[in-house]
Image: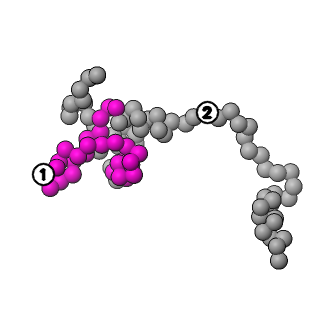
Amino acid sequence: MQKTTERSCYTINQFGRRYQIGARKVRDLIRKGALAAVDIGIGSGRTQWRISPEAVYAFEHLVAVKPTTEAPCRRPADDGISPTVAALLADD
């Protein structure tokens, strides 16, 4: 396996440009655990995140749209009120 170097990693801004999202959103993804990153600024008093190519790959697979085999949902042919809502309204 190839060793990941700092030069091959993305900064917050580089990752944001790649996916056309802001730096705040990238930090939110890191904080929520959806995107793995390493803080290389430990000891400097400043957070400096780096995102490895492997983390980018994992993120792309996490957010990829997966095809479904189910038929699309259709509205009921009745008056448009779901049975659950109709039951709640009927209980007096």
Mark 2, other Cα within 10 Å: few <14 / some 14–19 / many ≥20: few
Which of discs 1 and 2 lies nearer the camera? The answer is: 1
Which quadrant does the N terminus fall into?
Answer: top left
Q: Residue 83, relative to residue 58: is it above or below? A: below
Helix, strand or loop for disc 2: loop
Q: Within the magenta stretch, is there residue 69?
A: no
Residue 13: x %, y % from top left: 29, 44
Residue at the spot of label 2? 67
Q: Is residue 14 visible?
A: no
Q: Within the magenta stretch, is there residue 37?
A: yes
Say whether disc 1 or disc 2 marks the residue closer to the N-terminus. Answer: 1
Q: Residue furthest bottom?
A: 92
Mark 1, other Cα within 10 Å: few <14 / some 14–19 / many ≥20: few
Residue at (40, 42) in percent of width and height? 20
Residue 41: x %, y % from top left: 17, 48
Q: Is residue 7 found left or right of 55 in the rendered image?
A: left
Q: Is residue 16 found left or right of 39 in the rendered image?
A: right
Q: Is residue 38 visible?
A: yes
Residue at (35, 48) in percent of width and height? 30
What label sits on residue 43 in the rendered view? Answer: 1
Quarter location, residue 11: top left
Q: Residue furthest top?
A: 1
Specify start and end residues of the magenta stretch as a single range.
Answer: 25-54
Which quadrant does the C terminus fall into?
Answer: bottom right
Residue 72: x %, y % from top left: 72, 40
Q: Is residue 77 found left or right of 88 in the rendered image?
A: right
Quarter location, residue 60: top left
Q: Is residue 69 found left or right of 59 in the rendered image?
A: right
Q: Amino acid at mark 1?
A: Gly
Residue 2: x %, y % from top left: 26, 23
